Image (spheres, rainbow, N blue to C red):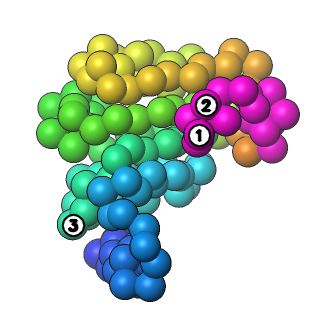
Amino acid sequence: MTPKGLAHIEMLLDYLDTTTPARMDSIVVIGVSDGCLGALQYAKMGKRKPLRFVLISTLPTLAFDSTELIRHAAFRTTRWDIFQGGHDRLFPGQIVFPLLRAWAGANPKVKLHLFPEGEHDLSWYGLHAEKELREVFR
């Protein structure tokens, strides 16, 4: 979330842009746990506008005030797929689910994938949300 971290992301995307035929307007930014904070920061401050973002195991209020999620243009107009578990040991569902629902209420492009039994473990989603993940990444 630091300027240096943001500069690293920009440098990687610049490299991708100059060395591959990738279309920069079709980028999907993915964050898992702490990586979600970087994705959120990039949405707000990055020079490119990715096609969408995918967050897995997140607590956006570690990065931004909850009102900012509802008011800032980057969070109100961009497409987001959010995978969150109710048994997440770091970001408990009883705290995160209401926040995510409020965000989805402010941005119809936020698609929530809430799993009451979900854990703070990427492998859990690979085992239990394979269909949803494949749909998001097809």
Residue 91 at least partly seen: no
Q: Which residue is mark 2?
A: 135
**Contact, mark 2 vs mark 1 (Cβ under 8 Å):** yes
Instruction: Tell me which numbered mark, 2 or 3, is placed earlier along the sequence.
Output: 3
Observer-nearest of 66 and 23 = 23
Q: Residue at x 81, y 43 (%)?
A: 123
Q: Which residue is mark 3?
A: 47
Label 2 Cα crowd, 10 Å radius (few <14 / some 14-19 / many 20+): few
- Image coords of residue 83 (percent x, y): 58, 31
Q: Which residue is mark 1?
A: 138
Instruction: Tell me which numbered mark, 1 or 3, is placed earlier along the sequence.
Output: 3
- Image mark for residue 44: none
- Reply yes or no: does residue 132 show up in magenta: yes
- Reply yes or no: does residue 93 show up in magenta: no
Residue 10 at least partly seen: yes
Q: Quadrant of residue 10?
A: bottom left
Q: Give the magenta-colored segment's residue range.
A: 123-138
Mark 1 is on which residue type?
Arg
